Amino acid sequence: MLPSVFATQLMAEAGSVAGRPGLLMAVAVTTAAASLWLLLPKGLEHKLTRPAGFILGAVALAAFALAGRRLGSIGEEAVFALVALVAVVSATATIVTRSPVYAAIWFAMTLAGVSGVLLILGAQFLGVATIVVYAGAILVMFLFVLMLAQPSGLASYDRVSSEPMLSAIAGAVLVGLLTISIGRLSAPVPADDVEAAATAESDAPADSVTAVVPDPLFENHVARLGGELFGRHLIAVEAAGVLLFVALVGAIAVVTRGEAAALAEGRPTR
Amino acid sequence: MTPVTHPMSVTSTSLVSASAGLRRRIWPAVAGCLTAMVALLLAVPSHAADTAAVPTAAVPTATAVPSMDLAPDGVLQNGLLHNGLLVGALLFALGLVGILTRRNMIVMFLSAELMLQGVSVSLVSWSRYHGDWGGQMLVIFVLTVAACEAAVALVFVLQAFSRTGRLDANAWQSLRESVLPRTIDQALPPLDGGVTHWPTLTPAGVEPAHDEEALLEREHV
């Protein structure tokens, strides 16, 4: 499997990669899979494994960045690339780091990156809510449980993973298939189509496709979001409230029943 | 179907050993998936050109151009949609890999949250592209369900931990299908760092004798 990966990579570097998005994406996906496989905990690592994983991961990230579409201005591209890089690199670190506490901290970093992406996409409320709800509440709950349950030191099951190569390949295949559908969805318009459309409209110049159209959801964003949420989706809000309540009751019921069972079996409870 | 039981001869890619028969059956499927995916990827530009060319060939007026490609928002919206979907796909796949391969239950749930984040990014990208609120509404409910899921799942994790004393998902492998091989952990080499030396302070002076009675005395009632 690996020789084919390296063959694809070498072939890609030899040829003009950026001109062919499919080849570029194939390189990105295969290098990402190899990098993930090298970085995942396997219990027994050569000392060159992690540097090789970092290098392959950098290659994959560069290929993914090249496969991204151009945005309006160079500044916007830079900001988007920065937050997307933070999100993806931290997500990788979340799943490859050995210590679960560090995994939780890296997940907080991922949330920061995702929040930046959401802000760029115009979802101001969700960007803030991601930080507040996820990093502020859910992640703290994770850390609390880790504090209760984590044995001292690095556990043996944190130093190995089950079938890292198969999992990395599964992830690569998933990204590849999703990318195919994304690419077919938002395929770049051929030049003659653009000109045909432009001449049909006849008031827009041919390069008007780069014109920045403001986000229709920008004005009074949170007010309109609240109106939509509590107007059109009111029933769903009520259902979500019931769901939260049931989850609360269920969590407490599981804990108390578990402690009763532990007492009945003579096991120690906390 | 007998599991590998040589504790010291570590030759596989991972120290977790599935049986050789399972590996032999899985590998052709994996190789087929990977090659098919790469072939599909290499075929993407031609497909895109085909789909873009067909409507204009059929009806050569500008109204027949697919609205998805020539949205009035132009390259910016389309680019934002493409990049957002790409980031979402990457986050989702990373979460998938994490939940498939990690064995710590808490890291598995973090990976599930990672997949939810990827879905959220994709939904918000669509919301921006179409200029309506549907995607953002869905993300709000994703947040709600994620909070419920985390609460209930962490309770289950705590219960499992109190029964086995481990956060290991493989501690529950007696619940697996009867045809699947048992996973046997091999002896791990010691960590590179060896013994951790925490910093200490040299004691200064002489520790005074403690008055036990005074320590137990309560000044306020």
Image (spheres, coloured by chain):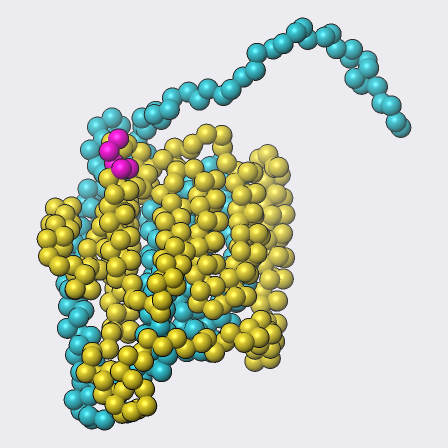
Chain colours: A yellow, B cyan
The residue at 41%/56% (across/down) is A83
Tell whether B41 sits left or right of B189: left
Could you tell me which quadrant the C terminus of chain B lies in?
A: top right
Which span is picked out in magenta? A47-51
The residue at 27%/87% (across/down) is A198
Residue A155, image quadrant: top left
Q: x, y percentage for residue A250?
A: 60, 56
Residue B65, image quadrant: bottom left
Q: Residue furthest right?
A: B221
Q: Nearer the viewer, residue B206 or B212?
A: B206
Q: Main secondary structure of the magenta part?
A: helix
Q: Nearer the viewer, residue A252 or A149?
A: A149
Q: x, y percentage for residue B21?
A: 19, 45
| Residue A178 appears anywhere in the view | no
B187 lies above or below A236: above
Q: Nearer the viewer, residue A121 or B217?
A: A121
